[in-house]
Amino acid sequence: MRRTLLWILGAGLLMLGTTRPSRAQLVVAAGLNFDDITDIEVLDREATFENATGWHLGVLYDIALGPVALRPGVIYRDMSNVEFDLAGMPEHFGFDVSMIDVPIDVRFRLAATPLVKPYATVGPVFSFVSNVDEEFEDAVEDFRLSADVGVGLELAIPGLGLRLYPELRYAFGVSKFINDEFTLLGQQVRAEESARLNSFMLRLGVGL
């Protein structure tokens, strides 16, 4: 995890050190993610995943183009403990997983006042597994694609030259999160359905 955070910090410094257009801004963002994995059937039993609450931290590069902005970023996301049950089994299962998200947002300004500018975002998110418990490594897909929509406010802070970006976001899985085939309890199993990861996110960004 330490290496991952250093990698994110390095990406942010690289963005900051790059010559920026006059309407571009580096944004440091952090927040909470509320993750939901769709249920699947394995070993002829239903596997029910519990909702997981985690956190995320990263950097975004907001390039304003009039009422529209392009905003790529790099986000470290920790899903904490993902728990699930197999129907009829007394044992409770769980694993920790973290990912690197690479969102490419298109941000649309909905209105404009001197201090408050509401906006909406839409775009793809490319996710790469950063860390997962060893016994579940082959169960979780190394790469996944999701589609992200959100709403937020751009708040100018007079006298400080800073901008705040509180956001509510929803990401729905386009590709699967759990592999169709993996090892569980020492057995090679095949899932009857593709489990997908959907997430609500509360995020606050600070534009530097």
Image: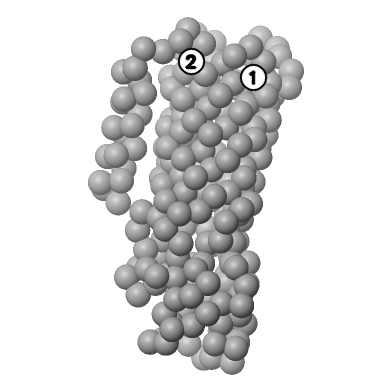
Colour theme: one colour
Residue, disc 2: 24
Asked which secondary structure carries label 1, the reply is: strand
Q: Which kind of residue does numbered mark 2 sit on?
A: Ala
Residue 85 visible (yes or no): no
User: Taking 206 as reference, is 203 above or below it?
Assistant: below
Q: Which kind of residue does numbered mark 1 sit on?
A: Val
Which residue is found at the position 31% from the left and 18% from the top? 17
> Camera-side residue: 82 or 137?
137
Query: As drawn, is 154 to the left or to the right of 9?
Result: right
User: Taking 11 as reference, is 98 above or below it?
Assistant: below
Total count of labels:
2
Q: Position of residue 18 (x, y in %)?
A: 34, 17
Q: Position of residue 30 (x, y in %)?
A: 47, 39
Asked which secondary structure carries label 2, the reply is: strand
Residue, disc 1: 68
